Amino acid sequence: MSPIVHPHTPRVAVACGCELGEEILWDARSGTLVWVDIENPAVWRHDPETDETHRLPLDEKLSFALLTPDPQRVIAGFKSGVACLDLESGARTDLVRPEPYPPGNRLNSGNVGPDGALWFGSMDDGETEPTGGFHRWDGERLLDFGGSAAVTNGPVVSPDGHRLYTIDTGNGVVRVHDLDGTRVGEPRPLITFEPGWGKPDGLTLDADGYLWICHYAGSRITRFAPDGQVERILPVPTALVTKCAFGGADLSTLYITTCRRGRDPALDPMAGHVFRVETEFRGFPANIYRGIGT
């Protein structure tokens, strides 16, 4: 049986033209979207109700900006490491970085788990050497897990705290780990991307435990069942799809970041924008980092 094609087409929500838009999330406290541009470094915020958009330019690549108890401060993944960032002044306090940490590395995808800890990846900025890995930071202890990769994505913890998903983007493999507190089980392959699918990039989970995975260079998002089977395909009208997250008052609107790096604007005019599409599913509001140092 062929998978379902999602009945609604994503539309541009914010015409931001990010070089490499990533790590979008919904701040349920303020009803706003937060995302980053890695290559043209900035934190973006957007209020869908008022249509107001704010951009905080920065002087170093950053890959995520996640919520803390203070709405004006985020825990951010810079090329040089994890820091606490003030969204008004741009002031930052450096917190931690993985060791060893080759000079060609940078941080990549990050998420806050239901435990309030930061789960994040590091990668080779040239996307060739397997010098990246996966990490957990609770404000006191840095834990490494999951082996090495050139390009990491995830890690994302299931809402019940019992499963962890990681992505080896370069090899096109989505993996699942059993999770017991801070004990991370060995990775098991769950999904292998087929030729023509592009590469697996950012992911999110819905309330039914299904995975929504973005296809970088694949012009789509796929909703996968917990056993790895394709449930539906969501075409996206640009090639480089990077991250998605549920938002809106009832958490049924899927917001999507994309990339315009290397794209010809005549052929891919919507590259780099943030998109939105309505779904019949529900997601979860972003978790808030509860570690020390913020």
Image (tube, grey):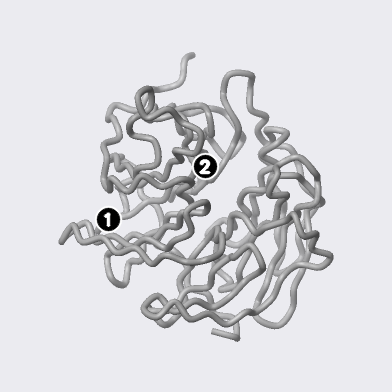
Residue at x 77% of width, y 65% of height = 183
Mark 2, secondary structure of its residue:
strand
Local crowd at mark 2 within 10 Å, few (<14), some, or many (≥20)?
many
User: Where the C terminus falls, by quadrant?
Assistant: bottom right
* Residue ID for mark 2: 211
Is residue 217 positioned above or below 283 on the image?
above
Give the percent coordinates (x, y) of residue 200. 59, 36
Amino acid residing under circle 1: Gly
Give the percent coordinates (x, y) of residue 39. 52, 51
Tell me which numbered mark, 2 or 1, is placed earlier along the sequence. 2
Q: State whether residue 222 appears in this view.
A: no
Mark 1, secondary structure of its residue:
loop
Q: Which numbered dot is residue 248? A: 1
Q: Nearer the viewer, mark 2 or mark 1?
A: 1
Front residue of this view, candidates 257 and 244: 257
The count of marks equals 2
Local crowd at mark 1 within 10 Å, few (<14), some, or many (≥20)?
many
Q: Is residue 10 left or right of residue 83?
A: left
Give the percent coordinates (x, y) of residue 61. 56, 59
Give the percent coordinates (x, y) of residue 212. 48, 40
> Residue reaching furthest top?
1
Amino acid residing under circle 2: Leu
Residue at x 44% of width, y 38% of height = 260
